[in-house]
Image (spheres, rainbow, N blue to C red):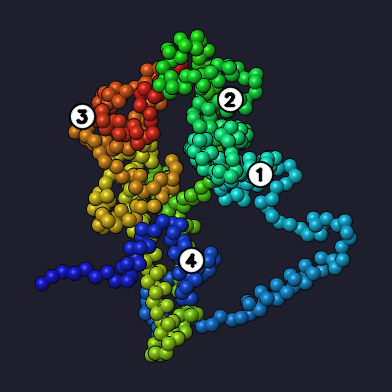
Amino acid sequence: MGQQLTMTPQLQQAIRLLQLSTLDLQQEIQEALESNPMLERQEEGDDFDNSDPMAENGDSKPVAEPQDTSFQESAGSGESSEEGEWSERIPSELPVDTAWEDIYQTSASSLPSNDDDEWDFTTRTSVGESLQSHLLWQLNLAPMSDTDRLIAVTLIDSINAQGYLEDSLEEICVGFDAELDIELDEVEAVLHRIQQFEPAGVGARTLGECLLLQLRQLPASTPKMAEAQRLVTDYIDLLGSRDYSQLMRRMKLKEDELRQVIELVQSLNPRPGSQIESSEPEYVVPDVIVRKDSDRWLVELNQEAVPRLRVNAQYAGFVRRADTSADNTFMRNQLQEARWFIKSLQSRNETLMKVATQIVEHQRGFLDHGDEAMKPLVLHDIAEAVGMHESTISRVTTQKYMHTPRGIYELKYFFSSHVSTAEGGECSSTAIRAIIKKLVATENQKKPLSDSKIAGLLEAQGIQVARRTVAKYRESLGIAPSSERKRLM
């Protein structure tokens, strides 16, 4: 005696579609449309066939008769008449000085008009540029000898994505062939030329040098320029440790003067290479849309994200029940696969709606009041509510997004562990993070709150959290320790 679970191809396909993101699902649907002639896209305005796509009557008789070709003929005649209209509009011979716009009417709405100052060509056509390609482009415009250009290319290859030179000049100099006889001072001279390229500060070897290069490219009349250059050259370590008393004593500055110098330094970019974006943008398409109607929260699928599919009635009508020829067998298999695919999509949508509805039902406080009202929620709670396994809930909440009036969130964002309260209740870890973020935003920047102090403030609100738990939540929010948050007011 024994039990065994066998996963049919239909079940495997349903599980695979369930865990795909919207963009991946659209690609999967497109591949299915291209490979299976029985599938077709349901266009807007078409009469939708409400019959069950899994019904078996498609094998016994044609679902629909071949359509009349009068529409196709009329469409073809329309094309020919349009071609004739264009041929009459375009003259056979044009004067030499004729402009394109005088004859042809372009309809490219994306092109700029004469008074469009905000139109940016790069934002519409570029696919991302690396820092190295940006520097090499500037190098090609700079007059330079062949030897210096070889040194410059080597230096640019050694600059990391943040804009800093990773290898020392000695290591770079040793890497050249002995026949070139390149000296260290030549490499350093070429580096100084690269450090004049954009973005400002690129090619620096240290943080102080990076900031100094940016200061040198500012106007000489900039207030506190000399003090800022001295600060980044000699006292960058004291600035990093926020030892303002030492800085005031060594630089012989008053508090107001030091504040102006620090503000000038903080306006610089410590990672100049980050200005050049080399990665492709990642687009998020929400699977579920949540909106409020009167006092109710409504949940609906994003119909524009997933196209509606149906079985092509004309091709399905060609399948004959008793025919065992190779062509008929192929068409029968394609028809069955099309039905399985449509049903798998329907199952995915139904499961997604069930899970999203339960999440919205559980997290109404978040939708109304924000992160601080987020309730504790785990996969088991939703699995029990919809009658499914936790693994299914995990698949359906991965890479699925919900559009709410507060923004677009991944479904997993609404799940969080809980912390006990003084009254015996529970508080979500997401809500605790929101409270910590709020406390840090309103703290006295001269005396920032320590993790122990934050834990005490949370305990005063009835939330029992240890200091190390506060530190973990603070780090997950990207908030620096109190010693690094200190500011000179």
Q: Which residue is mark 1?
A: 146
Res 182 → quadrant: top right
Q: Is residue 401 left or right of residue 215?
A: left
**Cα distance between the residues tagged 3 and 1:** 74 Å
Q: Nearer the viewer, residue 221 or 167?
A: 167
Which residue is found at the position 32% from the left and 34% from the top? 473
**Cα distance between the residues tagged 4 and 3:** 54 Å
Query: Mark 4: which secondary structure?
Result: helix
N-terminal of the pair, mark 3 or mark 1, is 1
Q: Which residue is mark 3?
A: 422
Image coordinates of residue 33 in percent, x first then y, are 48, 70
- The answer to whether marks 4 and 3 mark residues whose Cβ atoms lie closer than 8 Å is no
Image coordinates of residue 275 in percent, x first then y, are 55, 38
Please say whether residue 189 is visible from this viewpoint: yes
Image coordinates of residue 429 in percent, x first then y, are 29, 37
The circle on residue 30 is 4
Q: Which residue is mark 2?
A: 215
Image coordinates of residue 461 in percent, x first then y, are 27, 26
- Within 10 angstroms of label 3, few (less than 14), some, or many (20 or more) residues? few
Q: Nearer the viewer, residue 453 or 429?
A: 453
Query: Mark 1: which secondary structure?
Result: helix
Q: Amino acid at mark 2?
A: Leu
N-terminal of the pair, mark 2 or mark 3, is 2
Which residue is found at the position 50% from the left and 14% from the top? 258
Q: Nearer the viewer, mark 4 or mark 3?
A: 4
**Cα distance between the residues tagged 2 and 1:** 31 Å
